[in-house]
Amino acid sequence: MLALLTFLNAALVLLTFEAFILSRGISTAHWTEKYFESNQVKVECGGPESPSSHASCEKDFTQKPVSMSTSLALVPFDEGRVLPHEKTVREFSLAGHVFTIKQDWNSLGVAAVVWDSAVVLGEYLVMNEASVKGKNVLELGAGTGLTGLVAAALGANVTVTEREEALPNLRATVDQNCADKSWVISATKLDWTQPVDDSDFPAVDLIIGADVIYIEETFQDLLRTILSLAKSDQTHVLLSCKIRYDRDLRFLNLLRNHFKVNEIFYDKNRDIKIFSVVRFS
Ligand SMILES: C[S@@+](CC[C@H](N)C(=O)[O-])C[C@H]1O[C@@H](n2cnc3c(N)ncnc32)[C@H](O)[C@@H]1O
Ligand SMILES: *[C@@H]1O[C@H](CO)[C@@H](O)[C@H](O)[C@H]1NC(C)=O
């Protein structure tokens, strides 16, 4: 009897764990929420006046809120079962190409995993190839650069940008994915906290940003960066994001002081919106 009870108990623990993993595996929303909770801690530890401390604080938050390592020992290791951001490699088929993206959540955090916003914006570009092909495209906060790579595959001249710390990984991913291609794509530093030297980025037709609206303390810097790069209505800006908090809407309202902002696409399954942002003429 005792043995049976022990067995049932163990089975229940496993089942509960399974449900937990699956619920997290199916939707990234849960860990995204955790991520943002952690980010609030990050804001406190960095403080709005010390943006350079982002990286160290981000390291703190990569100490994941739930310890998966001990729990995972219960089930045989299987990449397919791991949360999307914990996978070390992911593949995406877009624009007739397979993009292989190495992820490194543990050491680089947000900048080294592919966010749903990047995939949705990539898919959107594929559906709107004509507005990408032959254009000068600049990606802000590119992370792994998936969206920029898709734009390059569609025939754009692409500059993917990131802050210093994330640049080596971005470069490596770009190099790996266009080794045997004739795509025009390069990776450059562009840190929103620093003034933009617009001679570095002449005549940008299209600015893309996936999941860049995410930390309130960067909003003014991000706004200033977009204003420096999109000086007229000739530069179109596309931002994809999951609206998680009221403050995300506040960023869109900040934009509305200078730009026409329209929601142009909604991916219901992933709850990602794409906004078209164009300077008042
Ligand atoms: C949530 S991630 C999105 C990454 C990628 N676009 C995607 O969707 O997969 C936000 C990105 O913004 C970048 N970022 C944050 N602050 C930045 C800054 N001050 N300058 C440039 N990039 C920044 C981060 O490094 C990170 O890659
Ligand atoms: C791509 O854009 C960059 C920066 O605007 C420019 O210097 C370069 O000549 C362009 N390359 C091509 C092939 O158009």
Image (cartoon, grey):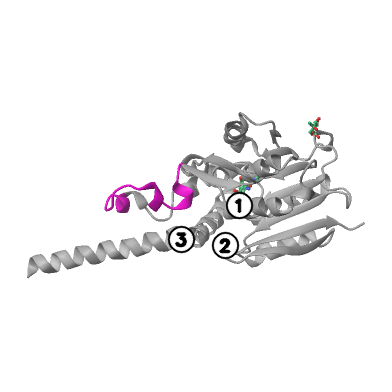
Which comes before the other along the chain, label 3 or label 2? 3
Q: Amino acid at mark 3?
A: Ile
Spatial distance from mark 1 to mark 2, Cα to Cα?
10 Å
Q: Which of disc 2 and disc 1 is earlier in sequence?
A: 1
Secondary structure type for disc 1 = helix
- Residue for badge 3: 26
Residue at the disc numbered 1: 119
Q: Residues within 10 Å of mark 3 (few under 14, many from 20)?
A: few
Question: Tag 2: Cα neighbours inside 10 Å, few (<14), some, or many (≥20)?
Answer: some
| Residue 3 visible to the viewer | yes
Magenta part of the protein: which range? 70-88
Q: Is residue 52 above or below residue 122?
A: above
Quickly name the residue at label 2. 270
Mark 3 within 8 Å of ligand 1, using the beta carbon:
no
Q: Compare residues 258 and 279 and report the one nearer the observer.
A: 279
**Residue located 48% across and 47% down the image:** 62
Q: x%, y% of residue 177?
A: 59, 35
Q: Residue furthest right?
A: 281
| Residue shown at 82% from the left, 42% from the top | 204
